[in-house]
Image (cartoon, rainbow, N blue to C red):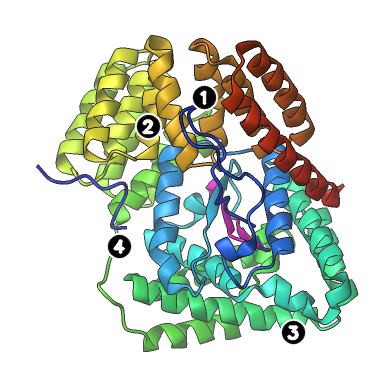
C-alpha cells in the first residue's frame, strides 16, 4: 500500500518566535523548566529581546486579529516552509505559523520566526509556485534580520523602536490599515533617516534569497516573477487603495526586471510542484472567504482552470455543508483512492463525519489515517474532538501528547481543557485553559486561571500539578511584562 504523506515531500515584512519549550505534558511526565528559553536555542543570530518581543507580538496578534482555524491548511503551510527553510539561510531558526481570516492579499514575517498569511493569499496566487514565492521572500527577510539591521544605528533605542514598529504592525495586521502602517513606518523613520534606501536594499536581498531558496527546493523561481507581475497589475488597477502588502512591497519595473534576470540564471534542483494539492488547499481558502456563498468558491476555481480533482474536492465539501454527508464522503473516498499520497483527503473525510455528528465514523477514519501517519496533527485533532463525545479519557491522553509536541497550538490546549474537565483531571484542565488564554494574548486571565488550577490541585493533593502551575505562573508573569511593551 502506498505511504501517505502529509501534503507533499516534505504586508508587512516585519519579523517573532516559535516556542521551543514544552508547555504541557501528562501528569506522569517529568517536570521541565518552563522559563523563556535563551535565543541560543532557536538561532544564535537572534537576540533574546527580539524573541521576547516577537513572542509577545504573536499573542497580541492572536487576541486582536481574526484567526483562520484550518489545521489541514496550516499543516500544508508549515510543510511548505519546512521545504524552503533549509535553503533560506535561517540557520536552524524554528518557525511557527499563523493564518488570518481575511480575504485580502497579505503575508508577513516577524522577528524570531513567525510567518503569517491571510486566506486571501491563496485567493490571489493561482498556482503553488506563486504562493511559495511569497513565503520564500518572507523567509529571506527573516534570515537577514532586516528589522534588527535597520535599527542597528540606534542601538540604545532599538528595542523601544522595535516595540513601536511591531505595535503599528499589529494595528495594520488586525485591520487598522493605513493607521498601523503610519505608526510602524513613523517609528522607523524617527530612528533611521535613510530607511527608504534600506527598505529597497532589504527587498532586493529578500528577493535574491527567496529566488535561490525556491530553486534549491525544486520550485521554478520564474514563479516569483509571475507573482510580481500579478501584483503589479493589481497595484495599477487599485490605484490609491492597494492592499497593505503592496504598500510595503512595491513592485517597481527595476525590481521585476532584476528578479527576472536572476531567475533565468538559476538551476532548479529536483524539480517539484503539486498544483493539484495546492488547488485543493486553495479550495478550502476560497470556501472560508465565501463562507456564505460557497458556490462562488467552486465557480472561481472553474473560471481559473483549477485542477479537475480540486473542483471535485470543493464540490464534495459544498455537499457536506449542505447536509449531503453520504455524497460528500463518497466523493472524498474516490479522490483518496485517486491520490493516495494526499493525507488531507482522508483527513477531510474524517472532518466531514465529525461535523455531521458521526463521531464513531470520525474516530474510525482518523485512526485509520493515523496508523499510516502517527503524528499527522489534523487527524489527531479530529480524533480528539470526536473522542470527546465517546471517550474523554482517551481524548485527554491524546491531547496531552499533542500539546507537548505542539506547544504553540491554541486549539490543542482548548480541546485539552475540555477533555481534562470531562475526564476528571480538574487541575490539569484549568492549567490547559490557562495556557490557551496566554497563547491568545489574555495573560491576566491566564494568571487568574492558574489560581483556580492551584486550588483544584491542592484539593486533589496533586503535587506534580502544583509544581507545574508554579513554574507556569513565573513564565506567565514574564509574558505579561513583555506584553506591556505594546500598551
Q: Is residue 300 visible?
A: no
- In the rendered structure, which disc, 1 or 3, sits on the residue that comes first in sequence? 3
Image point (67%, 21%), residue name: 453
Helix, strand or loop at mark 3: helix
Q: Tag on residue 415?
A: 1
Considering the whole magenta stretch, tell me its main secondary structure.
strand
Q: Tag on residue 380?
A: 2
Image: 138 above or below 302: below
- In the rendered structure, which disc, 4 or 3, sits on the residue that comes first in sequence? 3
Verify whether residue 113 appears in magenta. yes
Q: Can residue 276 be seen in this view?
A: yes
What is the spatial separation of the Cα atoms under label 1 and label 3, in whole angstroms? 47 Å
- Identify the magenta region: 106-120
Q: Tag on residue 273?
A: 4
- Please name whichever residue, 387 or 206, is drawn nearer the observer in this view of the structure: 387
Q: Residues within 10 Å of mark 2 (few under 14, many from 20)?
A: many
- In the rendered structure, which disc, 2 or 3, sits on the residue that comes first in sequence? 3
Amino acid at each position: 500500500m502506498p505511504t501517505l504523506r502529509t501534503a507533499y515531500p516534505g504586508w508587512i515584512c516585519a519579523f517573532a518566535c516559535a516556542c521551543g519549550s514544552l508547555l504541557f505534558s501528562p501528569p506522569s511526565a517529568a517536570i521541565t523548566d518552563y522559563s523563556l528559553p535563551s535565543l541560543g536555542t532557536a538561532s544564535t543570530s537572534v537576540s533574546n529581546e527580539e524573541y521576547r518581543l516577537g513572542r509577545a507580538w504573536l499573542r497580541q496578534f492572536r487576541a486582536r486579529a481574526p484567526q483562520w482555524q484550518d489545521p489541514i491548511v496550516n499543516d500544508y503551510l508549515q510543510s511548505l516552509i519546512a521545504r524552503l527553510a533549509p535553503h533560506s539561510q535561517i540557520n536552524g531558526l524554528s518557525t511557527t505559523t499563523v493564518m488570518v481570516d481575511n480575504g485580502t492579499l497579505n503575508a508577513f514575517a516577524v522577528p524570531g520566526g513567525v510567518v503569517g498569511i491571510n486566506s486571501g493569499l491563496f485567493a490571489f496566487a493561482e498556482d503553488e509556485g506563486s504562493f511559495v514565492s511569497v513565503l520564500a521572500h518572507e523567509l529571506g527577510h527573516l534570515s537577514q534580520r532586516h528589522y534588527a539591521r535597520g535599527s542597528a544605528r540606534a542601538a540604545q533605542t532599538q528595542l523601544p523602536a522595535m516595540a513601536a514598529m511591531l505595535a503599528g504592525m499589529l494595528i495594520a495586521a488586525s485591520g487598522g490599515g493605513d493607521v498601523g502602517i503610519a505608526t510602524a513606518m513613523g517609528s522607523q523613520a524617527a530612528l533611521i533617516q535613510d530607511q527608504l534606501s534600506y527598505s529597497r536594499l532589504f527587498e532586493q536581498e529578500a528577493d535574491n534569497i527567496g529566488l535561490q531558496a525556491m530553486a534549491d527546493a525544486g520550485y521554478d523561481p520564474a514563479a516569483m516573477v509571475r507573482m510580481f507581475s500579478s501584483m503589479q497589475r493589481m497595484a495599477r488597477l487599485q490605484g490609491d487603495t492597494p492592499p497593505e502588502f503592496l504598500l510595503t512591497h512595491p513592485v517597481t519595473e527595476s525590481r521585476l526586471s532584476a528578479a527576472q534576470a536572476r531567475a533565468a540564471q538559476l538551476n532548479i534542483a529536483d524539480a517539484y510542484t503539486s498544483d493539484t494539492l495546492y488547488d485543493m488547499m486553495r479550495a478550502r481558502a476560497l470556501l472560508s472567504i465565501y463562507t456564505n456563498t460557497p458556490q462562488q468558491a467552486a465557480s472561481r476555481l472553474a473560471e481559473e482552470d483549477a485542477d479537475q480533482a480540486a473542483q471535485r474536492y470543493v464540490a464534495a465539501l459544498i455537499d457536506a455543508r449542505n447536509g449531503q454527508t453520504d455524497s460528500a464522503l463518497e466523493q472524498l473516498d474516490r479522490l483518496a483512492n485517486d491520490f493516495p499520497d494526499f493525507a488531507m483527503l482522508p483527513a477531510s473525510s474524517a472532518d466531514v463525519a465529525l461535523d455531521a455528528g458521526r463521531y464513531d465514523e470520525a474516530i474510525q477514519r482518523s485512526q485509520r489515517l493515523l496508523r499510516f501517519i502517527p503524528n499527522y496533527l489534523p487527524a489527531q485533532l479530529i480524533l480528539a474532538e470526536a473522542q470527546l463525545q465517546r471517550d474523554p479519557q482517551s481524548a485527554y491522553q491524546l491531547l496531552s501528547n499533542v500539546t507537548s509536541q505542539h506547544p504553540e497550538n491554541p486549539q490543542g490546549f482548548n480541546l485539552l481543557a475540555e477533555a481534562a474537565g470531562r475526564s476528571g483531571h480538574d487541575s490539569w484542565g484549568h492549567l490547559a485553559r490557562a495556557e490557551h488564554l496566554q497563547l491568545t494574548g489574555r495573560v491576566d486571565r491566564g494568571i487568574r486561571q492558574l489560581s483556580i488550577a492551584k486550588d483544584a490541585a491542592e484539593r486533589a493533593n496533586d503535587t506534580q500539578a502544583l509544581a507545574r502551575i508554579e513554574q507556569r505562573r513565573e513564565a506567565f508573569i514574564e509574558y505579561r511584562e513583555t506584553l506591556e511593551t505594546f500598551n
